[in-house]
Image (spheres, rainbow, N blue to C red):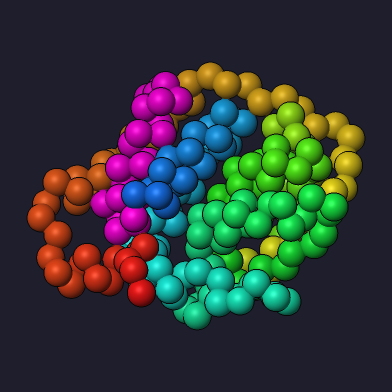
């Protein structure tokens, strides 16, 4: 079934809320899925995988513990939405270029929209590298992708290298148009979104992703 970009963003935002993310992070989740859809990439499907994996995991277990050296989470891996939001918040730090290394990270494709935000903010190209994937976004939101295959949709990688300030030829413009969403992906996202209609228990409010420490 085809959805408008607004419908994709809305459904994914609600699913993120149902998975326990606070409103700000859920907004980022919806925007990330939309951004990927604009570029012809399976944003809703990748987000559904991430949300089911991290459903109601505490925010502090998924966020970077320190921003010096390799970024690592207190838990087993970083959430790309949280790490991406942190990267965007620090965009000014990388205006002259730089390299950031992330330790074990889930679904690194979801870092791409935030890489696009950094590219917009700095005017520099931003490249994500993991396994045999090299994914570059420039300031016009065009992208260049090399070494895709199954690694592009990897559920977890040992390391992501983020390089700010490398020009890459061949970035193509996005094609903003409605994207097909698999019926099973829609069902999974709607199941998470439905959780927002049920009263939250005290335990879920405290333990859900995005809970205050």
**Quadrant holding the N terminus:** top left
Left/right of residue 29 with respect to residue 102 in the rendered view: left
Left/right of residue 32 with respect to residue 205 in the rendered view: right
Q: Name the quadrant containing residue 171.
A: top right
Which residue is located at x 47 percent, y 70 percent?
Answer: 62
Which residue is located at x 66 percent, y 26 percent?
Answer: 174
Q: Position of residue 73 (x, y in %)?
A: 54, 75
Taking the magenta stretch, the answer to whether it contains residue 2 is yes
In the depicted view, which residue is nearer to us: 178 or 115?
A: 115
Taking the magenta stretch, the answer to whether it contains residue 30 is no
List the single residue furthest toward the left: 199
In the depicted view, which residue is nearer to us: 182 or 24?
A: 24
Q: Is residue 5 above or below residue 18?
A: above
Left/right of residue 105 with respect to residue 160 in the rendered view: left
The kind of secondary structure the magenta stretch mainly shows is helix
Q: Is residue 105 above or below residue 169?
A: below
Tell me the magenta residue range.
Answer: 1-22
């Amino acid at each position: 079934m085809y959805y408008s970009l607004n419908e994709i963003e809305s459904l994914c935002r609600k699913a993120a809320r149902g998975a326990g993310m606070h409103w700000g992070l859920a907004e980022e989740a919806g925007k990330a899925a939309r951004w990927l859809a604009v570029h012809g990439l399976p944003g809703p499907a990748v987000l559904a995988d991430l949300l089911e994996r991290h459903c109601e995991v505490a925010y502090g277990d998924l966020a970077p513990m320190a921003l010096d050296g390799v970024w690592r989470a207190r838990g087993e891996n970083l959430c790309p939405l949280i790490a991406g939001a942190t990267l965007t918040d620090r965009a000014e730090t990388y205006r002259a270029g730089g390299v950031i290394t992330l330790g074990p990270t889930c679904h690194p494709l979801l870092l791409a929209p935030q890489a696009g935000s950094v590219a917009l903010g700095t005017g520099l190209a931003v490249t994500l590298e993991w396994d045999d994937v090299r994914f570059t976004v420039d300031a016009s939101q065009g992208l260049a992708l090399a070494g895709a295959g199954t690694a592009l949709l990897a559920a977890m990688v040992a390391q992501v290298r983020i390089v700010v300030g490398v020009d890459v030829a061949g970035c193509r413009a996005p094609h903003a148009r409605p994207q097909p969403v698999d019926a099973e992906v829609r069902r999974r996202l709607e199941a998470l979104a439905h959780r927002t209609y049920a009263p939250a228990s005290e335990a879920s409010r405290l333990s859900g992703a995005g809970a205050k420490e």
